[in-house]
Image: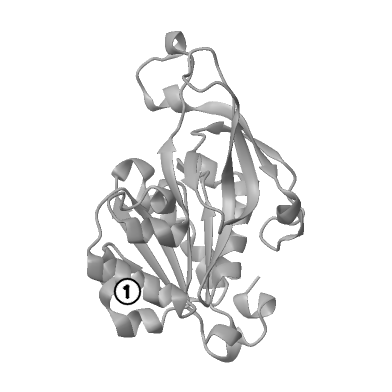
């Protein structure tokens, strides 16, 4: 669906999407973001791709951007760059991403964490005796459960609870988030926590005139191809895009 079909009035001019990628290579930032470029282009976006967060400090470029898709795990960001990102979102630029590319970015920047409303803390692993020393040690079967709000929201409406076998993110979060889906970490006998812990798996956040969407599944390319994960991310791009009222 083209963005102007979902948000009438945006189509007065061609919407502009900025894809920012980099950081830890384990999340395949180039391949992962490349897989969404055809969707954006089919949707009528003019797409710019940057391999650095330096663009966030370019006030003119950011003011002309309707959607930012970020895939930058860990890494660092300057105070000027994060200030530029925050100002753009507050003025109406949409901001979205998945997994560590948005929820585990710039750990040392409290201003960035305040903006996105959630920070990766861990992804619990398998029983110690079942671990072989590879990334699969952290691939756990788990459910993504759509909330009551999520069942009515344009991003997740019509999507049923679904199952994944991949990293299950435990995130620290705050009450400004509108949670569309959750995931629950069980209390296993080898873990130090004594009761199940439910964390947001998909959330939105209003920041000034801007919309933020965070989807925590997406560790690997195969997870990004899961029909429900992909639908959520693509709908999130459309929903986050600057609306006519925010122009």
| Residue 186 visible within the image | yes
Q: Residue at x 59, y 24 (%)?
A: 195
Who's the residue at 28% across and 62% down the image? 51
Residue 233 seen in this snapshot: no
Residue for point 35% across, 68% down: 49
Residue 190 shown left or right of residue 52 in the figure: right
Q: Name the residue beneath numbered marker 1.
A: 84
Tell me the SS state at disc 1: helix
Asked which quadrant contains residue 22, the reply is bottom left
- At 60% from the left edge and 27% from the top edge, which residue is drawn? 196
Judging depth in this view, the residue of 54 and 120 nearest the camera is 120
Above or below: residue 219 compared with residue 83 = above
Does residue 87 lie above or below 36 as drawn?
below
The picture places residue 139, in percent across and down from the top left corner, at 49, 27
Kindly indicate the quadrant of the structure image that contains residue 234. bottom right
- The number of discs equals 1
Please determine whether, in this image, residue 121 is positioned above or below residue 46.
Answer: above
Q: Position of residue 240 (x, y in %)?
A: 55, 69
Furthest toward the bottom, the residue is 12
| In the image: residue 35, left or right of residue 198 | left
Check the image and name the residue furthest to the top.
Answer: 129
Residue 242: percent from left, percent from top: 53, 78
Q: Quadrant of the N terminus?
A: bottom right
Badge 1 local density, few (<14 within 10 Å), some, or many (20+)?
many
């Amino acid at each position: 669906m083209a963005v102007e079909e979902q948000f009438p009035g945006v189509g007065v001019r061609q919407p502009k999407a900025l894809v920012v990628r980099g950081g830890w290579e384990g999340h395949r930032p180039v391949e992962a973001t490349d897989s969404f470029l055809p969707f954006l282009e089919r949707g009528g976006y003019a797409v710019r791709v940057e391999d650095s967060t330096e663009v966030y400090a370019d006030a003119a470029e950011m003011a002309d951007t309707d959607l930012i898709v970020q895939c930058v795990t860990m890494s660092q960001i300057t105070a000027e760059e994060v200030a530029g990102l925050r100002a753009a979102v507050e003025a109406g630029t949409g901001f979205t991403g998945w997994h560590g590319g948005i929820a585990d970015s710039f750990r040392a920047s409290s201003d960035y964490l305040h903006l996105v409303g959630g920070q990766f803390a861990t992804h619990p692993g398998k029983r110690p005796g079942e671990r072989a020393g590879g990334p699969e040690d952290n691939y756990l079967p788990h459910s993504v459960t759509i909330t009551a709000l999520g069942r009515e929201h344009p991003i997740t409406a019509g999507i049923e609870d679904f199952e994944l076998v991949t990293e299950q993110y435990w995130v620290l979060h705050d009450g400004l988030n509108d949670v569309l889906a959750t995931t629950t970490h069980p209390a296993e006998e080898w873990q130090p926590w004594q009761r199940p812990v439910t964390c947001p798996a998909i959330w939105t956040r209003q920041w000034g005139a801007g919309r933020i969407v965070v989807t925590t599944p997406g560790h690997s390319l195969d997870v990004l191809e899961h029909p429900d994960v992909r639908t959520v991310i693509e709908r999130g791009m459309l929903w986050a895009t600057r609306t006519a009222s925010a122009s």
